[in-house]
Image: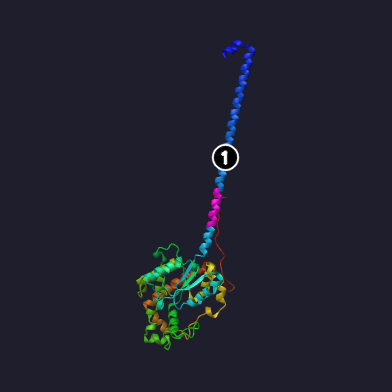
Amino acid sequence: MGLLRVMMPPKLQLLALLAFAVAMFFLENQIQKLEESRGKLERAIARHEVREIEQRHTQDNLRERDSSWASVSESDDDVVIIYNRVPKTASTSFTNIAYDLCGRNHYHVLHINTTKNNPVMSIQDQVRFVKNVTEWREMKPAFYHGHVSFLDFTKFGVKVKPIYINVIRDPIERLVSYYYFLRFGDDYRPGLRRRKQGDKKTFDECVSAGGSDCAPEKLWLQIPFFCGHYSECWNVGSQWALEQAKYNLVNEYMLVGVTEELEDFVMMLESALPRFFKGATELYKTGKKSHLRKTSEKKPPTRESTAKLQQSAIWKMENEFYEFALEQFQFVRAHAVREKDGELYMLAQNFFYEKIYPKN
C-alpha cells in the first residue's frame, strides 16, 4: 500500500481510499442484513415449533377429553346396585318394579337366593359374591336383590363399591305381617304352601300365650341386616349392633326408604338413578297387582298386644333404628321433593358452576 502511495498521484490515492471505504461499508451492511435475516429465520422457526407444540397439546387434551367421556359412558354401564331386602317391608313390590324396567332400561336383575334364606354368607361365599359383583361384566349394569345382610366390599380390596339401597318398616307392623305371611301367604303366590300353614292362631293370641313366633326376639331383624356379617350384629339386643347399623345406614347406603312412604322412595330413586329407574314412579302409580303385594288374613294387633311388645328392650332398640332411618329419609326428601296441588315433584338442579379458569 505504501508503494502504491509512492507510485500513484495523490488524487488517485484519495480515490482508492474512498473506494476501499465504500467497499468496506457495503460489505458490513451486507453482513448486517444477513445477520438480521438469520435472526428472522430463527424466530420464524421458533414460532413454528411453538405452534406445533401447542397443536400437539390441544390434540392430547381432545384425546383425554374423548377418553374421559368414554370412561363416563363405560362407568354408567359399570354400575351395580345391591338391594339387601329385609323380609316383609314391601321388598317384593319394589323388586317387581326393577324386573318390569330392566328390559326397557337395559340392565340385569339377579336374585341372591341363599340356602334356607340364611342372611349370613360363609367367608368363601363372601369372596365369591364380591368377585361376581365386581368382575361379572356380562351382567353389568346390574341390580342384585336378596335377603342378605350388609356386606362391606372394602374388606376385600375393592376400590369401586356397589350402590346399596334398602327399605325398612315399623318393627311391629313388619313382625305382624311376617307372622300372618308364614300361615296364610299373600296374594302374590296364593297357592304356595307356607311353613306355618294350618296354624289359625291370631297374632294377639300368640302374644297372650307368650308364643315364640311373636316373641320380642323376633323383632331383631332390621338392625342385623344393616349391621352386617359381624357376629355381634346377630346378638339380640346388642347396643354395638344398633350403632353399627346406624353408621352403615348413613355411610354405606345411598338411600334407605320406609314402607309407609314407598312412592316417595321410588320417585327419588328415579331422579337420582334414571339409568335404572326411569319410568318407575309412573309404573308404581299404575297400581298393578305385581306392585301391591299384600299378606292374606292379616289382622291388626290390639293395643294390649302392641303395648306388651313395646315394653321390651329389643323393641325399643329396633324402633330407635326405625325412627333414625325415618328421620334420615325425611331429611333427604325435604331437600329433593316439593308438593304442589297435592302432587309431589322433584326439584330441578339447584347448583351451577362459575368463575371457571383459566379462560380459553
Screen quadrant of the N terminus: top right
Residue 133 quadrant: bottom left
Q: Is residue 194 above or below residue 282?
A: below
Q: Is residue 95 magenta?
A: no
**Residue 359 place in picture, x, y as percent:** 56, 50
Q: Residue at x 61, y 22 (%)?
A: 23
Does any portion of residue 226 appear in the rendered image? Answer: yes
In the image, residue 42 sits, relative to residue 13, either above or below, namely below
Q: Is residue 61 magenta?
A: yes
Residue 323 percent across, percent down from the top left: 44, 73
Depth order, front residue of 233/43: 43
Q: Which region is colored magenta?
A: 56-67
Badge 1 amino acid: Ile
**Is residue 104 positioned above or below 296 on the image?**
above
Q: Residues within 10 Å of mark 1 (few under 14, many from 20)?
A: few
| Residue ID for mark 1 | 45
Whether residue 356 is visible: no
Q: What secondary structure is the magenta-colored segment mainly?
A: helix
